Amino acid sequence: MSKILALYHNEMIKFSHQLLVWALIAIMSVVTILASTFYVKMNGEEEFVMDQVDKSSITASYDSAKEQLGDPNRFVKHSTIRIQTSSDVIELFSTYYDFGEDEEATKNLYNYLNMSICSAMLVNYDFDKYPITQTALSQNAYAEYTLAFRSLIYHNMTPFGERDSAWYDEYCLINQELEFARSALFNHNYKDYVEAIKLHYSAYPITDTLDIQIQSRIAEVDVNGEMSVSETLHLNEILVNYFIAKDCLLKGAEFSGGSYTPLTESRRADLEDAVQILDYQLAHHSYASYENSNASQSVMFGISLGRLFLIVLAIIIAGSSISNELATGSIKSLIIAPVKRWKIFVAKLLAILTWILGGGFLITLLSTICVGCTQGFSSLLPYFYVSGGSVKSIPFLLFAFLYFLASSIEMLVYVLVAFVISCNSKNAGAACGISTALIMSGEIINLFLEGYGRHTWMDFLPYYNMDITSKVFSHLPLCGQQTLDSGLLSESSPIGLSLGFSTIYLIILTITLLWIAYDGFVRKDIQ
């Protein structure tokens, strides 16, 4: 063991004395930092642009409507009416709006509605305390209040003589909706907004309750109605997928390709875990907001670009590790020492892995620090998973490094190919060139294979087994790493290969490559 460590130490020193190695590490570090910063700036805070609604715009709208309308009282009539219900006679002081039937009627109706709504807003609304465009609650409550107010005006356009118990029931419903909408808007009360939309939807025979479920859940999360429009839209997207996932679990099937497909046991388990994680995140206010998604993806973008230079570095080290020494004859000193060849082999392999792992941790650390300093470390969510029936988490830095390892399987395979060639040849250029060519041609080969359709024999090709990130981390969308539709509601593996199958395949492939490399090295005739 001591000889292996000594050889390993010598290998590390040998490569650390090469200027090219440090030049690549410097470039890799700079690219990682710049890429992370670039992604943060290019995907800054999401903006939601809407028409300006403030006191001045409402005042202007009121003045314009009043000027065009003239005397509003000429359209209004009042009378006390009696309505026979199933159990009683209701006496009601009622209002009737008559805007006529000529071409001016629609214009008069529009102006009357605008004037009435704007008048109520100017008299009762606190624009300084609750700016309408600042929070989603203010905007949504304003829209609901306007809708309910308009519904009441339309409902009161029914002539007095035609008003019956059905008209009265709907009148009471609209008034209730308006009162809840008014409370939601003027008192900034999210629960009353939910009650208002419940009453609004209750008027329809076939009601989709998804929106009510979503708004009820948002009200639990955003108790004081402080979330912006963009934040609420993002949470709305999360909750849409959340309730669809629950519906899939309830039905035991999911809608795909125009029909329902029964859930497999693994798919059911994934959905159950996703729902449990999201319940936990919502309860602890730790779900992936747009800011979290942007920060997390910025880190991964920096890592992915930094890895390009790490691949070059690893291939150069692996490709020249033994072939250069064979070509120059410097390996003779180790063979004469004497040191068993398997110890030399193990030491060189450990040195290669050390440079890969060290480089991977460096770019992960730099990217995380860079984004943490610009976006705030609190914006980097941990990775959540379910174990033993409860939700657990992995700190972001550790998760990012593990993600790097899982997404670098392809790189490790190509580095091993370079090492195999290095062990069997004196040509370091060939080792580096062939490995680089395989990496560059990977996408082309994938596209070529896709043209043949899907066949069972393709399961045994390396290209279909080296991407295991979505299999190892099946809940990436819940941490902001992907869109929700790419994980929460879609199969984690598009070609259906299980993690177990890919893992066994990669282990066999790795052992095979190592055996070829070792066999070539120990059988090599050292001149």
Image: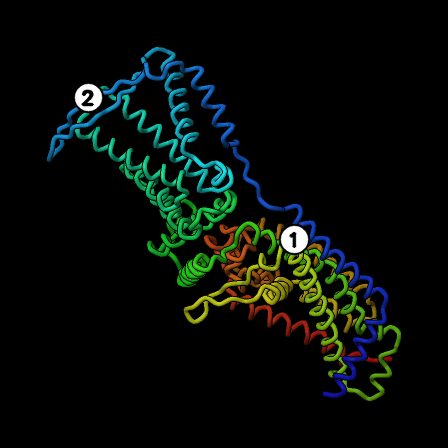
Q: Alpha-carbon distance for marks 2 and 1?
A: 72 Å
Q: Quick one: SS at disc 1? A: helix
* Viewer-proximal residue among 457 and 513: 513
Q: Position of residue 344 (x, y in %)?
A: 77, 81
Question: Which callout, 2 or 1, points to the residue nearer the camera?
Answer: 2
Quadrant the N terminus occupies: bottom right
Quadrant the C terminus occupies: bottom right
Q: Residue at x 51, y 40 (%)?
A: 134
* Viewer-proximal residue among 365 and 350: 365
* Viewer-proximal residue among 41 and 425: 41
Query: Within 10 Å of the Cα at label 2, are there few (<14), some (14-19), or many (20+) other Cα atoms?
Result: few
Instruction: Name the residue that disc number 1 marks.
Output: 443
Q: Quick one: SS at disc 2? A: helix
Q: Is residue 301 left or right of residue 480?
A: right
Q: Is residue 351 left or right of residue 112?
A: right
* Viewer-proximal residue among 71 and 332: 71
Q: Position of residue 486 (x, y in %)?
A: 51, 52
Classify residue 371 by image quadrant.
Answer: bottom right
Q: Is residue 51 left or right of residue 417?
A: left
Residue occupying the far right of the picture = 328
Looking at the rendered structure, the kind of residue marked 1 is Glu
Q: Is residue 358 left or right of residue 208?
A: right
Classify residue 400 by image quadrant.
Answer: bottom right
Q: Position of residue 275 (x, y in %)?
A: 42, 58
Query: Within 10 Å of the Cα at label 1, are there few (<14), some (14-19), or many (20+) other Cα atoms?
Result: few
Classify residue 280 by image quadrant.
Answer: bottom left
- Residue 16: numbered disc: none
Looking at the rendered structure, the kind of residue marked 2 is Glu
- Residue 162: numbered disc: 2
Q: Position of residue 126 (x, y in %)?
A: 45, 37
